[in-house]
Image: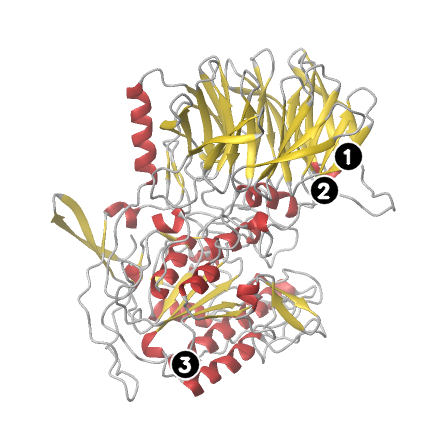
Amino acid sequence: MTGSKMRTLAIGGAALATVVTAGAPRAPTGAAPSGNDGPSPVETRQTASSPLVNKTAGPRKDGTAVTPVGYRVTPAGDQTRLGNLPLNAVLHPDGRHLLVTNNGQGVQSLQLVDTRTNKVVQTLSYPSPESLYIGLAWSPDGKTAYASAAANSKIRVLSFAGGRLTERDPVKLPAKTADGKALTLFPAGLAVTPEGKKLVVADQLGDAVTVADTVSGQVRTVAAGHRPVWVTLSKDGHTAYVSNQGADTVDIVDVTGPAPRVTGQIKVGLHPNKSVLSASGRRLYVANGDADSVSEVDLTTKRVTRSFSVSPSQKALVGSNPTGLALDGAGKRLFVTESGNNSVSVVDLTHGRVLGRIPTGWYPSAVIWYNGRLRITNARGLGAGPNNGPGHPDPERPGGTSPSQYVGSMIVGTLSSVDVPDSGEQLDEYTRRVERNNAPVTEVSGAVVPRRPGDRTPVKHVIYVVKENRSYDQVLGSLGKGNGDPGLNLFGDESAPNTRELARRFTTIDNFYADGQVSASAWNWVTQSNSNPYAEQMWPAAYSGRKGVYPGEHNVPENAAQDPQNSYLWQRLDKAGVSFANFGFYVTRRGSEVHAGDPVLDARTDHMFQDDLGCPDSAGTFAPTKDTCLSPRVDQWLKSFREYEATGDMPTVQFVRFPGDHTFGTAAGKPTPKAMVADNDYALGRLVDAVSHSQFWKDTVVLVTEDEAQNGPDHVDAHRTLALAVSPYTQTGKVDSTFYSTASMVRTVGLFAGIGPLTRFDDYSTPMSASFTDKPDYRTYSVIKPTYPMNSVNGSDLLTRTPGGK
């Protein structure tokens, strides 16, 4: 904990520590604004157990890790390194070879694992635009493997002999519609009929199902449900059960004829993922990714007969996110990968209850049972760690980032090989370990951030500002306080003077992590405190030229991490009757205006506040790169703010998006990275200046973060990013090294607004209480204009014209 002092207290037999973070000396308390004495001081006690301020995100040398949200990862069994984002695995009929598909943003791959040694014995690599996806299957005789190649509209066919795979001609799927338009079916899950003659494929982006003849390659496609992802065949191979990941249904598809035919639909839980058939063929078990449950379907009646909750407790909020399933040999136990809990639950099917949990790596995605042993693919293994090596992200350097330094591709998946516990004692020990891993570290209390929704607080207004893509070290590494690396600081006082001065004068928050890797997933975390399995499996294809859709910032049901009408922060505010206004969150351009797809959000959206990166965040900086730009963002926001001042009434919560620090990198003719960061920083400074000189300053907090940190290096972890809490109650100059993440900020917004947590992630997370004091300092803030020339444009001499921010 940088620059801090800790005093241990014995309270109720537990060792707690009062966080007395110290940085620069605290300035004298300023006077309250004229005409208002401010709220009366309220006694506060902010406590945290020592792990809260000592832990950081990332892998550990002992084979454990901490995720960005704060969960510990302590996988059971033997661990094997795989590729980037393993989403599925299938066991060869001989039981000796496991085929894994790695579906990350970088080089995708098929890997063959020898189950006797747990070693990878073959890797077939597929750099973009070649692709893979979640679909894998072996032919019944084990001589052929099939793998979906989503972006390439084909199914890869591989011969297997002598323990090696050899790719041969694929099964090609339609790439054009009947009238000649481009078509991306995006094949996902697949299955082979028992006689090996037909291949049934879920076409996720085509909302279709395809049946292919494995000999002739002839294909037939039929329309199906929304975002189909998985196929399980009946025991006789006549019927396919297709999980519609964008809905809450499983399609029943007759595959006996020359073309598939949808004959019915079964309603299950929200956003079903993988499924598995019982040995008798009479029951189907379906993992409901955003309902935290498993549906048991009677295939005679085509109805759900039982539903098993995989929530860790009856009171737990959504967030277990079950993905994969496997049955034991006797068909009495069901194993469920819980990607949100980093565990596999063991379900007793006789009594319909969870017996316990087995700890896994980060984000388990698939599980296979064979001869009393589980093979579990962990999509994110042990996480990222630092990305400060050669080729680290640098928007001023042409040529891109090394895959080993980019948070979207540097995370290595793992395979856990675990003996199924043969005693209740062993499973109980595993279960206790999972509970410890996911238990909230501490309870933090104070007079400023409420402990519970509705508790007293002097803060009446929250302005939630989200920027784009910067890491902590890239902007604050040379601040002179906090845990920074000056050698990685690119944007200094010349281009980010306001961000840096706000971090100096108010609380320096130096242990804050973005919960998402890239914007597509991170904006889900920013607005709903989770990114669901659909988004997590889809974004790598969208970010690597593999034809995936962008699974965020759109009002579509598959992106919602729970009930699409009750998933987002603004929906909860609306239901609670809390006033809010939107400036740029989840909007798109429609003619001369911008609108949000969600009617609830759109009704409170400023329709002239644009989110186009080519338009500046502030006036007086670079020239708009498009002739369709509206008013610069902060200037448009100021119009509404002046109205709030005039009426004396301001919404409880404001959502404000300032995307300019994303930058265009080195794109010719575009503003330089430092010009765009300076423009963005100037906009933030102007916003804080306006608030601090208004009647609202006394009871307002401006919470600021980046959606994620993908375009910056960091010496702690590639997820670490900057966060600011700006208020009279944070103007202390102290360093707060408490472990926070995006979910912490979402929870803090909710507590100030008087609403409860959205998911189990913000429910788990630590509110940002330690950044606040009950002794307000009402001094105002005056914007600092960056000295860097904000009209600079990229040219051949870019690097010589952009002095470093050391």
Q: Earlier in the sequence, mark 3 or mark 2?
A: 2
Observer-nearest of 58 and 373: 373
Observer-nearest of 457 and 790: 457
The outermost residue toward the right is: 179
The image quarter in which residue 589 lies: bottom right
Residue, disc 3: 649
Determine the residue positioned at 27% across, 83% down.
32
Local SS, label 3: loop
What label sits on residue 206 in the rendered view?
2
Query: Residue 225 in the image: x percent, y percent?
Result: 66, 41
Query: Residue 91 in the image: x percent, y percent?
Result: 58, 19
The image quarter in which residue 253 lies: top right
* Disc 2 and disc 1 in contact, CB within 8 angstroms: yes
Seen in the picture, residue 621 relative to 443 is either above or below; the reply is below
Instruction: Judge from the rendering whether residue 248 lies leftward or rightward of residue 735; answer left or right.
Output: right
Local SS, label 2: loop
Seen in the picture, residue 352 relative to 329 is either above or below; the reply is below
Query: Residue 750 in the image: x percent, y percent?
Result: 38, 61
Dot 2 alpha-carbon crowd within 10 angstroms: few under 14, some 14 to 19, many 20 or more: many
* Disc 1 and disc 3 in contact, CB within 8 angstroms: no
Q: Indicate the colouring scheme.
A: secondary structure
Alpha-carbon span between mark 1 and mark 3: 57 Å
Seen in the picture, residue 250 relative to 451 is either above or below; the reply is above
Residue, disc 1: 221
Determine the residue positioned at 57% across, 27% down.
301
